[in-house]
Image: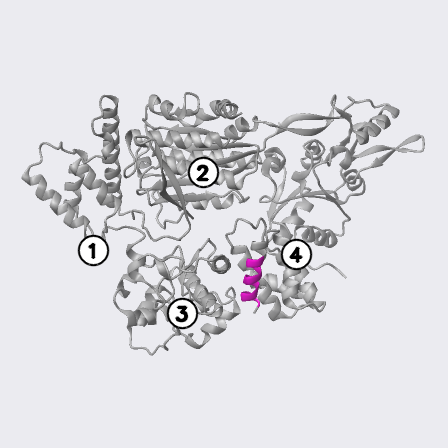
Amino acid sequence: MREINTLNNNNDNKHLIALGFLASSIVGREIPIRYLLSSTQLAYSDCRTIFIRPNTNTEYQRLEVLSQALLLKLGTLQEPCLNKLIGKSNVNNRFLIIELARGYQLFFDQLPRILLSALQPFVLDFDSQSAEDSLRIAQSYRRIPRGPEWLGSIRPFKLLFTPKTSLGQPIDNDELSELEKKVKAPKNDDDKDEEEKSYKDKLWEYLSSPLGNDGMFSKALRDLLDMSSSPDDTGQEGSANTTTEQVKSKKVQYLQDMLSAIRSKTNIDTGSNDSEGAFDAFPEWNYKENTYRYNWVTAEEVEPYTPDFLLDDLQLERHRFYSFYKALSKLNFSIEKCRGESFGNDIDLDRLVQFKIDAKVGQCDEALIYTAMRRSGRDIGIQILMDVSSSTLEVAEDDKTIAYHHINLAWLLCQSFTLLGDRVALHGFHSWGRQLLKMQRIKAFGESSLAKIDQRFRQLSIAGYTRVGAAIRFGVKQLDENTSEAKKLLFVVSDGYPYDDQYEDKYALQDTKKALEEARLKGIACLCLAVGSDVDHARLREVYGSTNFLLVDRIEKIPAKLPKMIVNALRQIN
Amino acid sequence: MSRFYLPLGDEIEIFSSAFEQKLPLLLKGPTGCGKTRFVEYMAEQLGVPLISVACHEDLSAADLVGRYLLKGGDTVWVDGPLTKAVRQGAICYLDEVVEARADTTVVIHPLSDHRRELYIERLGESIMAPPNFMLVLSYNPGYQSVLKDLKPSTRQRMVSVELGYPEAELERQILVKETGINQDVAQELVKFANAIRKLDVATIAEVASTRTLVSASRLIVGGLNIKSAVWAAIITPLSDDIETTRNLGELADTYLD
């Protein structure tokens, strides 16, 4: 079920943003507020967003936001014991009240008075120390007052299943091994025997369980097992076939990653379609018909939020920072007025007087009395796009995942440029088909604090596919709207394999190329950086041009080469 | 009347000990958390004069040490604040030190290690610091474009104390003691400030500091109504973005209802 903004006028949006401030002031991270579609439902939250009723007055809406925010602050909505509430609306309501009472006592000195006084009538001393305690009390025969509607509701089913995984039932070990074996050795179309067919049917049964709606994982599996390919690679020869092979092996890799994730009991983000409502639509280039497909891709900018990060061992390589910082500090483009120069365009009167005095007391230094116009300012706006599709979970030669390298490289770039005073934005992108391109915002242009970046990296979701063209168009739009700098740079940190649903091979490459062309027309220089990827040079050269990509096996090789590349890329624009 | 300062941790002990051991001190902390007040308080407690210098990007070594000035047709040497502090044995407090030009570190370094010596190039003179001289630097790590970060070599000469905003209860006491504001109103103000500190919003560069809370309390004690005081002292200074201030206003409505 999908909630949308029913009243889409401007005032209403402002109202929701103000309520978002309120929620954020309690939870401590960005919480968007949206309206429920149906007026019969009660307010709830899916951990990312708070949904409230559109048809009550502001006072109640505030209380709805506050009580859901309190649940988020308590961590109630992430408790595994919520599964005991499924289908038991009575216990659910009682549990909600007890949890809110627990929050009331725990955070008494932090919550606004309107919430405290509104909650007061329901706050008995339940003596609950944890969500489990609350659940036990809720299941007991204890009398608990009925709460008003603004307390909202908890939707355990939604919380436990939709955002994390669409795989409905736990898969047992045998099934898993069998699945792994299959994925490792995909068979050719020709030898489909009965056994395989029955196996496939079994798999389908499993994947199309009530909870496993037609997710991309299932789709990828179907693609792989049937080896069905998109219309684009019919009748292609030679090199095209090898790329198809490459893409196929990527698909296999994707599935293997998924399976190893299931093995390690990691929650997999399969890209839930539950949206926060703010979408951008981008065109895509169809090289076959030589036309754009307008409004073809829908992109959504989201705050990174996965409770379980896939790379627990993420360690930012902070010691590399100075080499990046030093290399990038050499880039100076604009002209600035410098004082205290030994020769220049104008005389600095203050310094001249001081110089005269020094001369008089017999201490004659160099006459640094001029002001000069020097090329020293930077004035660059930078957007970094980081590929966080599941293919980056592949392990590079140095036993670290490509995602690890991507995160480190993006962090180093972002940190260096920001500290050099440039305006930087950083997004991680991945997609599940053309309707679900997610841009995870790690740093926005206006943000000055670098402290949040670490945390957002840790909450990054790494999954899905790579629809590079649309991501680039998103980056171009960001640079266009948010920067007024003279120079604009777009970095794509990617493993170089664009692949998504109906986005493969030549189609993907041509679209990426077209997106880069659009960027250049808007005066934005684009660079692609790949670390540890096994992609071939020819492929990157075809898309990015001979000088605008850098493929290295180790991050430390980048600082030496990057400044020159940037200067080159910017020169191509001018 | 002596100044009021409520310690957040062991900063008073560290300061006193550093003073006795003749070690320089580096104070870190966000805007308006009480760094300057702390130094003033300590100077008073230790009975040592305090010379403060607000550093800015044009502040050079000569501004600190001193320079020759023209007087009539003659030149006269005038001591800078740092030289004055060394000569008379005072605490020299360089506020927001990273803002100063890089050449200032040249004079700070020999003063801040075992040498404790100020060399005045122009006079060809070297002054040994008396026991009462202490160098205190302050800096706000989240605030500067860290292009001007402190050099590691400067940092490592310092004993450092990190100050933050006080806990809710302490902050309430500070407001009450400092301004005489009503306890309950103080509590609501502190709640509101903590709400702003938790906000995850890109358009606010800083958060509501203890200083802004004190200002708001002053206005309230002076007779202004709570909402106007909060608008004037907390919300409007935080952001120039109309949308943001409006949303903060709504937040204030909720917290200070």
Disc 4 to disc 2, how far (Cα)? Answer: 39 Å
Amino acid type indicated by mark 1: Pro
Question: For residue A151, which numbered disc appears in the image?
Answer: 3
Residue, disc 1? A210
Q: Nearer the viewer, mark 1 or mark 3?
A: 1
Quadrant of the image occupied by residue B115: top right
Q: Amino acid at mark 4?
A: Arg
Please, which chain is the residue tagged with disc 1 on?
A
Cα gap from disc 4 to disc 1, whole angstroms: 57 Å
Task: Give percent across and percent down for residue A379.
Answer: 58, 33
Q: Nearer the viewer, mark 4 or mark 2?
A: 2
Q: Which one is nearer the viewer's eye here, A35 or A193? A: A35
Quadrant for the N terminus of chain A in the image: bottom left
Q: What chain does badge 3 belong to?
A: A
What label does residue A498 carry, if any? none
Magenta segment boundaries in residue numbering: B246-256
Q: Which numbered marker is on residue A475?
A: 2
Between A94 and B65, the one nearer to me in the picture: A94
Asked if the residue at tag 4 contacts the one at tag 3, i.e. Cβ–Cβ closer than 8 Å, the answer is: no
Vertical relation: A179 (above or below) A492: below
Q: Secondary structure at mark 3?
A: helix
